[in-house]
């Protein structure tokens, strides 16, 4: 029998591979958004300095540019490939799906990225060495190249949420995949917030100017930029939410940690207050405070935002045809892709997954726990941690008094028919379901020990 081309599972005990990808990606968002926001601001500021004959302002571009060389172009260039490495092992078929649709988009993005990197060096090291007009042009090219890299990545990220146009399903085509309502809304939202971030991080640099007049002038420009950007970002967020697939609403409304919306709102309000303060009282701009604000945005703004975006995409990882657990779950005639679900339904996971260990293809009394663990690793661990910590620990749902056959029944009812909106369809043969149930039960805290968790997450919600 022909098997399904699944890869081995990358498993990080205690955390889950998803969170590792998330941590790297969140850091990368901070570094990259700062640089794109700053790049456009530089283009504007260089032009402003030229027109108003205030060459001193270029000193800010030079110092902030130098800061970005490390902050964005060293740290960003470590975390960027970090996303590639981690997602390739966490989600090989998700990445494969993206490459099959977007290989030339990525090639294009790298061309612009090279321009961007050369641009930032020119911008920093040529201040005062070339005439101001040429320098302004360099700033403009740098800004446009940076923004283009973002445009391309955002189109690809939106495809991960859902394909740009429904026609893509039948006709394929890179533009159908790339451009959709979600692409523009997400681009708008990221554009706004990248300016907020660039204005906050810019404060770290601006605060160190000794020339009080210059510091005030820059602090106020950053504050105005920050206020306008943060307000429009909050508006764009509403637009973005309106362009999400229907499954995303279920996750948004019921399944995100309760503190997420509060955290996001608090960060937006706090950021606004901070900008108003530094506008009214530029002397209040201190590097340490700007640094703390940056960390606050990272932890309470970007992390919830990235985790939410990942969560509401469930059960899919890309294009609404590759499930997060790597199984192809839908036909895409336009790409010649066929769902693998019928094959799994017919033969079971153990018979169709290439990397099932020797001796585990058939469930026996001796190997049930081992087989159950293999199934949990291959089909659940991408979204559920198998230990007590990390992302949505599987054991928490079944703490308490459930028996093996109750769990097995639940698994088949909730997963086999694809009845749970945010989870993949996972057809399990009877013996597979029982093996998985036995394994889950073996990891579950005993009844009574953990009743608190049991009562918050009883599994009968669907
Ligand atoms: C695509 C990601 C994904 C995969 C794969 C996945 N789940 Fe889930 N699962 C979720 C999400 C999202 C929730 C929502 C609950 C939450 O966030 O706590 C959930 C909830 C659950 C619940 C709680 C009941 C409910 O309906 O909310 C159980 C039980 C569960 N999963 C079991 C499993 C098992 C067993 C597997 C593997 C056979 C599995 N899941 C695979 C994403 C997934």
Image: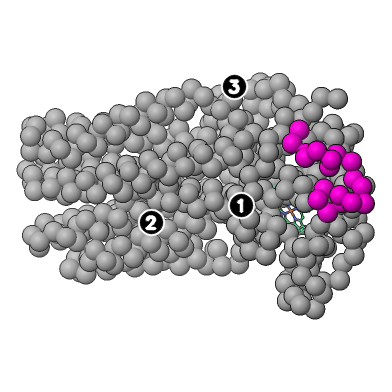
Number of other residues with Cα within 10 Å of mark 3, as a class: few under 14, some 14 to 19, many 20 or more: some
For marks 2 and 1 on the same chain, the one whose residue lies earlier in the sequence:
1
Disc ID at residue 12: 1
Q: Nearer the viewer, mark 3 or mark 2?
A: 3
Disc ID at residue 230: 2
Number of other residues with Cα within 10 Å of mark 2, as a class: few under 14, some 14 to 19, many 20 or more: many
Q: Is residue 265 visible?
A: no
Q: Is residue 165 magenta?
A: no
What segment carries the magenta color? 354-371
Q: Which residue is mark 3?
A: 173
Q: In the figure, is residue 258 to the left or right of 306?
A: right
Q: Is residue 369 magenta?
A: yes
Q: Position of residue 435 (x, y in %)?
A: 87, 52
Q: CA distance from mark 2 to mark 1?
A: 36 Å
Q: Considering the numbered disc 3 on the image, is that residue within a helix, a strand or a loop?
A: loop
Among the 4 quarters of the image, the one containing residue 271: bottom left
- Front residue of this view, candidates 291 and 180: 291
């Amino acid at each position: 029998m022909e098997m399904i081309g699944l890869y081995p599972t990358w498993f990080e005990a205690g955390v889950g591979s998803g969170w590792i990808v998330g941590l790297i990606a969140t850091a990368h968002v901070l570094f990259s958004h700062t640089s794109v926001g700053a790049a456009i601001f530089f283009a504007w500021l260089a032009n402003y300095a030229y027109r108003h004959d205030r060459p001193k302002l270029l000193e800010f571009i030079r110092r902030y540019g130098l800061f970005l060389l490390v902050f964005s172009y060293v740290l960003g260039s470590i975390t960027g490939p970090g996303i590639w490495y981690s997602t390739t092992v966490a989600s090989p078929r998700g990445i494969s799906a993206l490459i099959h649709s977007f290989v030339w988009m990525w090639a294009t993005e790298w061309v612009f990225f090279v321009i961007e990197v050369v641009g930032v060096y020119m911008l920093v090291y040529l201040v005062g060495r070339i005439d101001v007009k040429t320098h302004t042009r360099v700033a403009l090219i740098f800004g446009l190249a940076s923004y283009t890299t973002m445009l391309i990545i955002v189109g690809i990220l939106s495809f991960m949420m859902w394909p740009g146009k429904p026609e893509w399903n039948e006709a394929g085509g890179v533009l159908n995949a790339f451009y959709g309502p979600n692409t523009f809304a997400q681009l708008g939202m990221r554009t706004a917030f990248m300016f907020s971030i660039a204005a906050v991080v810019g404060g770290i640099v601006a605060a160190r100017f000794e020339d009080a007049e210059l510091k005030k002038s820059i602090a106020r420009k950053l504050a105005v930029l920050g206020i306008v950007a943060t307000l429009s970002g909050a508006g764009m967020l509403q637009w973005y939410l309106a362009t999400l697939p229907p499954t995303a609403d279920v996750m948004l409304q019921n399944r995100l940690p309760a503190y997420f919306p509060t955290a996001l709102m608090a960060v937006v309000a706090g950021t606004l207050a901070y900008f108003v303060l530094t506008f009214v009282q530029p002397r209040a701009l201190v590097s340490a405070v700007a640094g703390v604000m940056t960390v606050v945005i990272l932890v309470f703004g970007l992390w919830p935002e990235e985790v939410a975006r990942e969560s509401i995409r469930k059960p899919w990882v890309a294009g609404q045809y590759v499930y997060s657990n790597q199984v192809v779950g839908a036909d895409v005639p336009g790409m010649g892709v066929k769902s693998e679900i019928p094959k799994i339904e017919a033969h079971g996971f153990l018979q169709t997954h290439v990397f099932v260990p020797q001796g585990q293809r058939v469930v026996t009394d001796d190997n049930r726990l081992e087989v159950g663990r293999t199934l949990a690793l291959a089909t659940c661990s991408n979204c559920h941690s198998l230990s007590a910590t990390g992302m949505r620990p599987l054991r928490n749902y079944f703490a308490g008094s459930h028996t093996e056959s109750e769990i097995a029944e639940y698994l088949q009812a909730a997963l086999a028919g694809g009845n749970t909106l945010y989870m993949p369809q996972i057809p399990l043969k009877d013996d597979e379901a029982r093996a998985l149930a036995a394994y889950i039960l073996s990891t579950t805290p005993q009844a009574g020990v953990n009743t608190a968790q049991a009562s918050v997450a009883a599994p009968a919600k669907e």
